[in-house]
Amino acid sequence: MDEALLYEQPAGPVIFLSSSILTSDGQYLLRTISPSQAQKAVSVRRFESAIGHEATAVTVSMLLNIDCPMNRKIFKQEVGQSATIFQPTKRLPEGLTPCESLQAGNTNQLLHLLST
């Protein structure tokens, strides 16, 4: 994977999502990234949350040591824009604390819109 997609800012902020969802027509690159790659990316790039559940936003905040607010925004990815996905590795029951959610495990992915 071209790591520049993680660390450069070609189009808008990197968006945090809680599932892999395609919001625009086009060709995408989807790659699994490590938590340390996600941490490095947010240390050098501007980001916005499109995570609509408080517990997930808190889990991302804990994982990356940042303030990731819950934000039920409508997001449409633009060409050149990256989204970082924090998705549980399994379906989680309701009512887990952020610590329990973090212990359950996550898959971290980079979703980059290459072209429309």
Image (tube, helix red, strand yellow):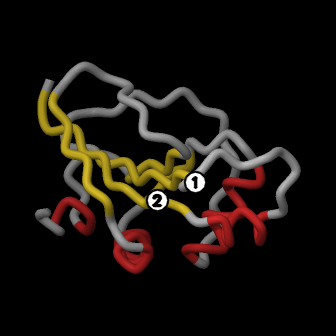
Residue at 37%, 48% (x, y): give it. Answer: 83
Q: Kindly give the residue lying farthest to the front in the view shown.
A: 90
User: Which badge, 2 or 1, comes first in the chain's sequence?
Assistant: 1
Residue at 58%, 54% (x, y): give it. Answer: 88
Determine the secondary structure under disc 1. Answer: strand
Question: Is residue 1 depicted above or below 56 in this figure?
Answer: below
The quarter of the rendered structure image containing the N terminus is: bottom left
Determine the secondary structure under disc 2. Answer: strand
| Amino acid type at mark 1 | Pro
Mark sitting on residue 107: 2
Report if the CB atoms under discs 2 and 1 are less than 8 Å apart.
yes
Direction from residue 22 to residue 54 in the image, left or right: right
Residue at 41%, 54% (x, y): give it. Answer: 84
Nearer to us in this view, 9 or 116:
116
Question: How far apart are the alpha carbons under marks 2 and 1?
Answer: 6 Å
Residue 10 spot, x, y in % from top left: 20, 52
Q: Quadrant of residue 57?
A: bottom right
| Amino acid type at mark 2 | Thr
Question: Is residue 30 depicted above or below 46 in this figure?
Answer: above
Q: Kindly give the residue lying farthest to the right in the view shown.
A: 95
Nearer to us in this view, 90 or 82:
90
Direction from residue 87 to residue 103 in the image, left or right: right
Q: Mark 1 highlights which residue? A: 88
Residue 36 spot, x, y in % from top left: 40, 80
